[in-house]
Image (spheres, grey):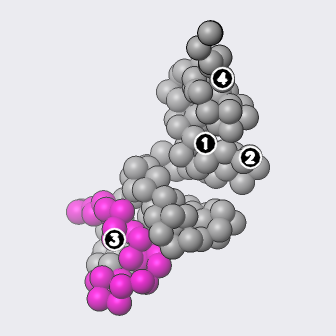
Amino acid sequence: MKMFGLDTNVLVRFLLMDDPEQAECAKRIIDEALIAGEPVAVALLAILETEWVLRSCAKLEKKAIITTFRMLLESRDLRIEHEESLEEALYLYENNNSDFADCLMAIRYKRSGCTAMLTFDRKAATIPGVLLLPPKAP
């Protein structure tokens, strides 16, 4: 059985349908794989880049991004790398003012056995398990 991994641009075209030709190609390839019973993989890096595109380029609100990612998580046909980490990061992102990337990093560090994620970012330090480093002493 073969399995395809999606690049960020394929995932974005599939989600946004903002380029008719590429969107149709992405949809066709994904549909064909699913019909053939072949799983489609999505890396956490592709999720991270997709969040940036959805927020920065497509100008989607936080709630819409969370809804989009939850839709991906609910799909039985997608194999999302470290799916449980994405679920936890989305929970943090939804219930915190921190950036999605910081939420995802904090969860991945936690799951890899780190005691804490260290940061200079005050907003990121509001995430459980993230420690704010003090500024340099004068």
Residue name at image x 31 percent, y 74 percent: 33
How many C-alpha atoms fall within 10 Å of the one at disc 2: few (<14), some, or many (≥20)?
Answer: some
Q: Amino acid at mark 1?
A: Cys
Residue 5 inside the magenta-drawn segment:
yes
Residue 17 location, x and y as percent?
A: 43, 83
Amino acid type, label 4: Leu
Question: Label 2 to label 3, Cα distance in Å?
Answer: 29 Å
Secondary element type, mark 2 = loop
Q: Which mark is residue 131?
A: 4
Q: Residue furthest front?
A: 138
Assess whether mark 2 and mark 1 are in contact (beta carbons under 8 angstroms): yes
Q: Residue 41 location in percent, x, y?
A: 37, 59
N-term-proximal mark, 2 vs 3: 3
Labels 1 and 4 touching (C-beta < 8 A): no
The residue that label 1 is drawn on is 103
| Element under disc 4 | strand
Q: Check if residue 14 falls in the magenta segment.
A: yes
Specify the label residue 96 is tagged with.
2
Estimate the spatial distance between the alpha carbons at disc 1 and disc 4, rounded to whole Å.
13 Å
First to last magenta residue range: 1-25
Residue type of the residue flagged with mark 2: Asn
Q: Can see residue 47?
A: no
Q: Classify residue 10 as left or right of residue 76.
A: left
- Residue 97 lies, in percent from the top left, at 72, 48
> Could you classify mark 3 by the number of other residues whose Cα lies within 10 Å: few (under 14), some (14-19), or many (20 or more)?
some
Lower position in the chain sequence, tag 1 or tag 4: 1
